[in-house]
Amino acid sequence: MGKEGFLAVILMLPAVDMDLRTAKVENSWILCSAVLMAAMKIAGCGTKALPAMALGSAVPVILLWPLFRIRALGAADCKLLSALGLLLGPEAVFRCMLRTFLIGGLLAGALMASNGTAKERFRYLKQYAENGFCTGQWPPYRREEFRAENIHMTVPLLLAVLLWAGGL
């Protein structure tokens, strides 16, 4: 694991801890992480890295906006991925996003299978999509009550960062 990977993992650990304890990741932590990641990238590559950093930071915001808009994904998850994009660049942050959703889906699927709620959740997703497409209105997707399969995305994000840091 290189310096960049080590930094990304170290900065993700407190974010995961905050998310699991309080269901929030402090903006001050995300900003501090973004500044440190940007500084590490500029120190290693110089200012020629700025376009890739900007694009890497923008990719998560652009691609995840629809999920954030319907509240299927939290703002902190988008901001953390955007901060990581400064360090990883556009291609690697995109792969990290894909891995995050794959790992998150596998974790949620395992939880739904273990507690027997898979049928109910797929029925809810189908109904939600049908209502959204028919009415053009997209209320928040996430239910307010706690559901075991509503996982904290910082956990699969940390696992995706670990895979990236490990060279995968």
Image: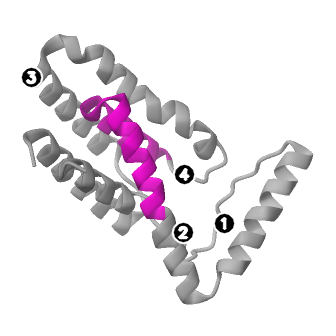
Residue 16 horizontal side relative to residue 117, left or right:
left
Of mark 3 and mark 1, the one earlier in the sequence is: 3
User: Label 1, label 4: how many angstroms apart (C-alpha)?
Assistant: 12 Å
| 89 shown above or below 50 | below
Q: Determine crowd level at label 2: few under 14, some 14-19, many 20+ residues with C-alpha closer than 10 A.
A: some
In the drawing, what numbered circle is on residue 57?
none
Front position among marks 2 and 1:
2
User: Label 2, label 4: how many angstroms apart (C-alpha)?
Assistant: 10 Å
Percent coordinates x, y for residue 94 in the rendering: 41, 38
Please identify the quarter of the rendering in which residue 121 is found: bottom right
Percent coordinates x, y for residue 8 in the rendering: 20, 45
| Residue, disc 3 | 43
User: Label 3, label 1: how many angstroms apart (C-alpha)?
Assistant: 44 Å
Of mark 1 and mark 4, the one earlier in the sequence is: 4
Give the residue furthest to the front. 168
Q: In this rendered view, identify the residue nearer to me: 105 or 150.
A: 105
Q: Secondary structure at mark 1?
A: loop
| Residue, disc 2 | 150
Front position among marks 1 and 4:
4
Give the residue furthest to the right. 134
Q: Secondary structure at mark 4?
A: loop
Q: Are marks 2 and 1 in contact (CB under 8 Å)?
A: yes
